[in-house]
Every structure is written in structure tokens, then in C-alpha cells.
Image (cartoon, rainbow, N blue to C red):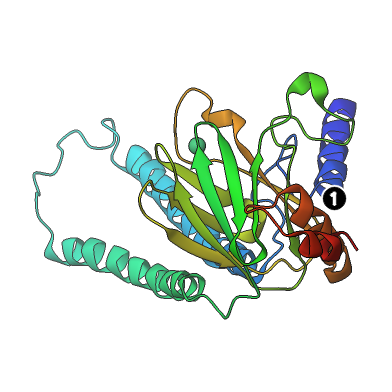
């Protein structure tokens, strides 16, 4: 009993402390950090779960009822009936209705995610075997983002998720993400933002998110892409506008895509 209580309490505590990455004993989704993910979670919790539970309970009841009511000892001469029009119409119509009830809100969420509002910042994510490369096209930035090996982890860095160069974005801004790949299929996915898009060589996919809370959010490549598929995590650091500007002025020097002129360099480092 003590063990169960311990597991339960540690589950609660870790869930609260690290809401934006997978946790031990996690049950369900990671905590939502964008409107899009909140939509997904409420669709799942308020509509899908009740339907799933109701169907499971109903089927279980039918099976138990059939086992007891039509057991061999109670039915020495089994019925030879093969068709029942009413039942057949019902078991076709009711599942159709259930699917329609599920499809309407599901498509609403899909279309909402698909229509990208006016972007405040555009980022390009490029999948490589096996790491992610990022570009900030409007800021002349380009950098690679590699997973930190287990032996090099700092105490607050999560294993298999922490990277050397995180994507830094300002909080409360619409971030448009252009996603592509250089070699094979990858997928850029961030559960807390409800974002997942395939990275396809020769094609640019796009998605967007608006992070509502400051913090570091982790995701992973979600398309089986090769031997080190599990070792190309995605880390997005959401910061305040001032912190973002600070980072930007450092990054303009550190990650400059094209050579910057001296006066620009001076400006950037100010
Ligand atoms: Cu990949």
C-alpha cells in the first residue's frame, strides 16, 4: 500500500514539476501549452473518452449477457435464426452516427490548426540523419541542434531530450514553422503545442503554434528515420520578449548565415 501511495504521489509531483516533457508513470497527454493542444485534449477527454467507455461497457455487457443467457445448458436446442433486419439496420446506423458525432468537432480542430494566422516569427526546421537544423530566415540565423549525450548532461537536463542549441521563441507570439528534410522522412513534433508535421525531402510543410507559457518544451522526431531516430530530440525554449531580443542579438553573431558587415556586427553585439 505504501508503495502504491509513493508511486501515486511521485507521479503527481513529477507531473506538476515537468509538465512539458514525458514523465515517469505518465498517464495521458503532456500538459497543454497552446490553444491548439487544449482543443485536442478537450476533444479527447470530453468526447472520445466517454464514447470509448460507453462502447466498451456496452460490448462487455452484451458478451456477458450472451454467455449467461445462451449457454449450452440453458439452450439445448439453439435457434437457427440467421437474419434480423431491425438489428442489422441498427448496428449499421448507430456506428455511422457515432462517427459523424466524432468527425464534426475533429474536422473543426484540424481546419483551425491548418489555417495559419499572421506570423510574428518564422522558423525553418530541417531534418537530417540524425539531428535538426534550424533557420530564422528573417534574422539571418542558421544553426544545428544536436542531442546532448548522456555523459555530458547537466543535472536539470532531461536524458534523450536536451539539445545543445535550443530553438528560442518569444511567448504569446504566432510562430510559423516551415518543415523540411534533407535526406529521409522525419517529423517535427511537439506534444505540448499540439504540433506534428512530416519533414519531407524536397517539400516544405508548414504549421504554427502560439506558446502561452514561458518554459522549455521537448519533442522528438516522430517518423522512423533510421538507426538514430530516437536521438534527434526537439527542444523549444519559450522566453519573454526582452529575453528573446537578448538571445537574438547574441545569436546574430554566433549563428550568422551570411557574413555580416562590421557595422551590423557592432549593432548586433550592442
Ligand atoms: Cu528523424
- Of residue 87 and residue 91, the one placed in the foreground of this image is 91
Q: Is mark 1 within 8 Å of ligand 1?
A: no
Residue 107: name its quadrant. bottom left
**Neighbourhood count class around disc 1 (C-alpha, 10 Å): few under 14, some 14–19, many 20 upward:** few
Residue 191 location in percent, x, y?
A: 62, 52
| 252 to the left or right of 267 | left
Judge by depth and name the residue closer to the eye, 44 or 187: 187
Residue 214 visible somewhere in the drawing: no
Q: Quadrant of residue 110?
A: bottom left
* Residue in the picture at 63% in, 54% down: 258
Side (left or right) of 264 relative to 119: right
Relative to residue 218, is residue 123 depicted above or below? below
Residue 117 position, x and y percent, is 56, 79
> In the rendered image of this protein, does residue 197 appear above or below residue 230?
below
Q: Nearer the viewer, residue 98 or 86?
A: 98
Residue farthest toward the top in the current orientation of the protein: 151
Residue 17 picture location, percent across and down: 87, 47
Is 7 on the left or on the right of 71, as rendered? right
Determine the residue located farthest toward the bottom in the rendered image.
118
Q: Is residue 78 left or right of residue 246?
A: left
**Residue 230 visible to the viewer:** yes
Count of numbered marks: 1
Instruction: Give the quadrant of the N terminus.
Output: top right
Relative to the observer, which residue lies in front, 209 or 175?
175
Q: Residue visible at 9% across and 49% down?
A: 82
Badge 1 marks a residue whose secondary structure is helix
Q: Position of residue 157 (x, y in %)?
A: 82, 35
The residue under label 1 is: 16
Amino acid at each position: 500500500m505504501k508503495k502504491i501511495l509513493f508511486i501515486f504521489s511521485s507521479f503527481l509531483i513529477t507531473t506538476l514539476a515537468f509538465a512539458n516533457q514525458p514523465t515517469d508513470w505518465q498517464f495521458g497527454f503532456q500538459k497543454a501549452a497552446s490553444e491548439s493542444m487544449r482543443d485536442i485534449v478537450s476533444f479527447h477527454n470530453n468526447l472520445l473518452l466517454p464514447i470509448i467507455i460507453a462502447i466498451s461497457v456496452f460490448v462487455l455487457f452484451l458478451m456477458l449477457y450472451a454467455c449467461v443467457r445462451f449457454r449450452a445448458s440453458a439452450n439445448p436446442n439453439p435457434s437457427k435464426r440467421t437474419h434480423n433486419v431491425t438489428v442489422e439496420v441498427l448496428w449499421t446506423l448507430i456506428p455511422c452516427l457515432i462517427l459523424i458525432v466524432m468527425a464534426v468537432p475533429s474536422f473543426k480542430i484540424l481546419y483551425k490548426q491548418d489555417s495559419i494566422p499572421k506570423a510574428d516569427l518564422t522558423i525553418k526546421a530541417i531534418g537530417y540523419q540524425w539531428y535538426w537544423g534550424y533557420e530564422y530566415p528573417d534574422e539571418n540565423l542558421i544553426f544545428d541542434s544536436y542531442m546532448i549525450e548522456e555523459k555530458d548532461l547537466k543535472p536539470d537536463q532531461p536524458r534523450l531530450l536536451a539539445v545543445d542549441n535550443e530553438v528560442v521563441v518569444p511567448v504569446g507570439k504566432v510562430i510559423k514553422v516551415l518543415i523540411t528534410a534533407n535526406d529521409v522522412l522525419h517529423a517535427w513534433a511537439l506534444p505540448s503545442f499540439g504540433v506534428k508535421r512530416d519533414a519531407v525531402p524536397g517539400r516544405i510543410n508548414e504549421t504554427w503554434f502560439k506558446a502561452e507559457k514561458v518554459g522549455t518544451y521537448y519533442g522528438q522526431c516522430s517518423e522512423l528515420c533510421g538507426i538514430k531516430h530516437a536521438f534527434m530530440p526537439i527542444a523549444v525554449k519559450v522566453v519573454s520578449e526582452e529575453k528573446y531580443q537578448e538571445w537574438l542579438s547574441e545569436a546574430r553573431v554566433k549563428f550568422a548565415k551570411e557574413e555580416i558587415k562590421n557595422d551590423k556586427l557592432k549593432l548586433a553585439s550592442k
